[in-house]
């Protein structure tokens, strides 16, 4: 499972932040790792430049896009005041979405392995 991190220019943090994101994603999605080829993580500060929104609380946004084997990509987004919370929230939302997506394939054919599902088996 490849993890690609893209952060907006207004997000502070270097390699330590990227490593933290990788760890959170790997731990949250460990059980689904065989079903995932790539995760794209996009983080941004939706409140804009410092001082632009006086009196407003910061809104950190984390969007995660998962590319699944033999399925369409799925994505989630989480906005929180703290970047750490947005990353964790998005990772847990993504886990639930992947479980739900693969569960639908199993519900349609209990003997089917979601990894071997054909495009016809994938709900639209």
Image (cartoon, rainbow, N blue to C red):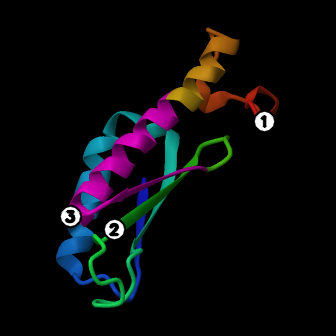
Residue 15 at x, y = what percent? 22, 79
Find residue 112 and report its image quarter. Answer: top right
Q: Is residue 62 above or below residue 54?
A: above
Mark 2 or mark 3: which comes first in sequence? 3
Q: Secondary structure at mark 2?
A: strand
Residue at screen point 60% across, 27% down = 114
Residue at screen point 39% across, 65% down = 61
Residue 60's disc is 2
Residue 31 at x, y = what percent? 35, 33
Question: Can you identify the residue that label 1 sits on?
Answer: 119
Magenta stretch secondary structure, dominant: helix
**Cα separation between marks 2 and 1:** 35 Å
Q: Is residue 118 above or below residue 105?
A: below
Residue 20's disc is 3
Residue 40's disc is none
**Cα separation between marks 1 and 3:** 34 Å
Q: Is residue 52 above or below residue 5?
A: below
Q: Quadrant of the C terminus?
A: top right
């Amino acid at each position: 499972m490849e993890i690609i991190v893209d952060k907006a220019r207004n997000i502070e943090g270097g390699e330590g932040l990227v490593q933290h994101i990788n760890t959170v994603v790997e731990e949250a999605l460990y059980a689904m790792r065989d079903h995932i080829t790539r995760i794209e993580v996009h983080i941004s500060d939706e409140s804009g430049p410092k001082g632009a929104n006086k009196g407003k609380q910061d809104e950190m946004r984390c969007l995660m896009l998962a590319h699944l084997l033999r399925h369409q990509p799925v994505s989630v987004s989480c906005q929180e005041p703290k970047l750490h919370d947005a990353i964790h929230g998005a990772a847990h939302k993504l886990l639930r979405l992947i479980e739900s997506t693969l569960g639908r394939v199993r519900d349609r054919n209990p003997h089917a392995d979601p990894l071997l599902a054909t495009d016809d088996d994938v709900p639209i």
